[in-house]
Image (cartoon, grey):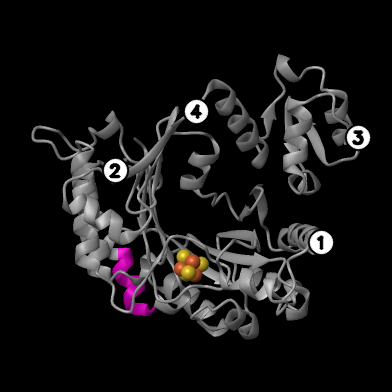
Amino acid sequence: MKHLYVHVPFCQRRCSYCDFSIAVRKHIPAREYVDAVLRELTFLGATDPGRQPGDLGGETLETLYLGGGTPSLLPPDAISALLTSLLDVFSATSSRDVFEVTLEANPEDVTPDSARAWRRAGINRVSLGAQSFDNRVLQWMHRSHDATRIGDAVRSLRAAGFDNISLDLIFALPAELERDWARDLDLAGSLLPAHLSLYGLTVEERTPLARWISRGATSAPNDERYAEEYLLAHVRLAAYGYHFYEVSNAARDGHRSRHNSAYWSGRAYLGLGPAAHSFDGKVRRWNLAAWEAYRRAVAARRSAVEAEEVLTEEQRELERLYLALRTDQGLPVTALYRPLPPATARWVERGWVEVRDQRLVCRPEGWLRLDALVSDLTNPGRTV
Ligand code: SF4
């Protein structure tokens, strides 16, 4: 197994748009959490007597990703203990350039001390939940940082030796917020993080945002604004040297996320922690989502897996198609798609996708319409 995801479910409050299964805690049960994750590993046979480091899946780790939730709420010594124990079980690839260890962090958790401690613990990539540089917008989102903390966090991380920093931004916010998206893009670009992830706002059930919309206190995100802001991001960020290598992700100087790239290329991965997903190429499994349910299960030495799905050949093909078209590598134009179905050929004529080196590759306009493109490829009779 080359790719390991560890889910840290704790947050200090719930953001207005978030429906993740999180555990809101003022005090983080760090020790209990680390023990639970390591105990979960024992059910996977990773710590069986006689088993050697790296035996789980027979391969060395290339990426390790601490996601959440808010992993940066774990004290640095808990992060260090967790990584040390995981690397006792899995062996990391020997090349430091290849082994990518990401920590998702909220800007307010980054201080010069925490950044240095993370670095010492072996983290070499930090993904910051910036979301916006507008304090009004951050308050509306229920974020716990203000805009100045983002730049401070980037500077503290750089001073501690991190050159692989990613920022998340959310776009397509309701019109009445009058969010200046171009300004946010410029502020993000001028910090020159190695990587940016951009997510369009979606309305999930049972979130504060869904309640605000249902009582008319705010408007729903709209598709036109989404498309306008998405296309603007491509133009604006190109000026700062960013290349979109996936529908929602842009990188400078080849700093693609190796971990997420593994997902997009359909590779196997193991997930640990509440709500974590695992995939072995055919079967997808997911853990109990609620922290308490997960904690109780592993404490009772029961499996943390809630359910699994065996993908049919057809599902795997559809997934492969989607994943390929999400990235700038595109879909190989195999015999299956040669000649291109007429509906797909019209996408090329319109300039929404291109055929490059025998691969069908989306342009930003194609990424905006990915579902329709896949539908045209799989139902060649349809018209655009
Ligand atoms: S910090 Fe992230 S996981 Fe936590 S509530 Fe906000 S969006 Fe959700």
User: How packed is label 2: few (under 14 Cα within 10 Å), some, or many (20 or more)?
Assistant: many
Q: Are marks 3 and 1 in contact (CB under 8 Å)?
A: no
In the depicted structure, whether residue 277 falls above or below residue 49: below
Circle on res. 311 = 4
Q: Which residues are magenta?
A: 110-119
Q: Is residue 231 left or right of residue 159?
A: right
Check disc 2 and give the amino acid type: Ala
Is residue 326 at least partly visible in the picture?
yes
Q: Are marks 4 and 3 in contact (CB under 8 Å)?
A: no
Q: Which residue is mark 3?
A: 349
| Labels 2 and 3: the sequence-earlier one | 2
Mark 3 Cβ inside 8 Å of ligand 1 = no
Q: Is residue 208 left or right of residue 286?
A: right
Q: Which residue is mark 2?
A: 92
Quote the CA–CA distance across marks 2 and 4: 29 Å
User: How packed is label 1: few (under 14 Cα within 10 Å), some, or many (20 or more)?
Assistant: few
Residue at disc 1, secondary structure: helix
| Labels 3 and 1: the sequence-earlier one | 1
Quote the CA–CA distance across marks 4 and 1: 36 Å
Check disc 3 and give the amino acid type: Glu
Q: Which residue is mark 1?
A: 228
Q: Residue at x 70, y 80 (%)?
A: 217
On the image, the x and y values in percent for residue 272 come to: 32, 48
Is residue 357 at least partly visible in the picture?
no
Identify the main secondary structure in magenta. Answer: helix
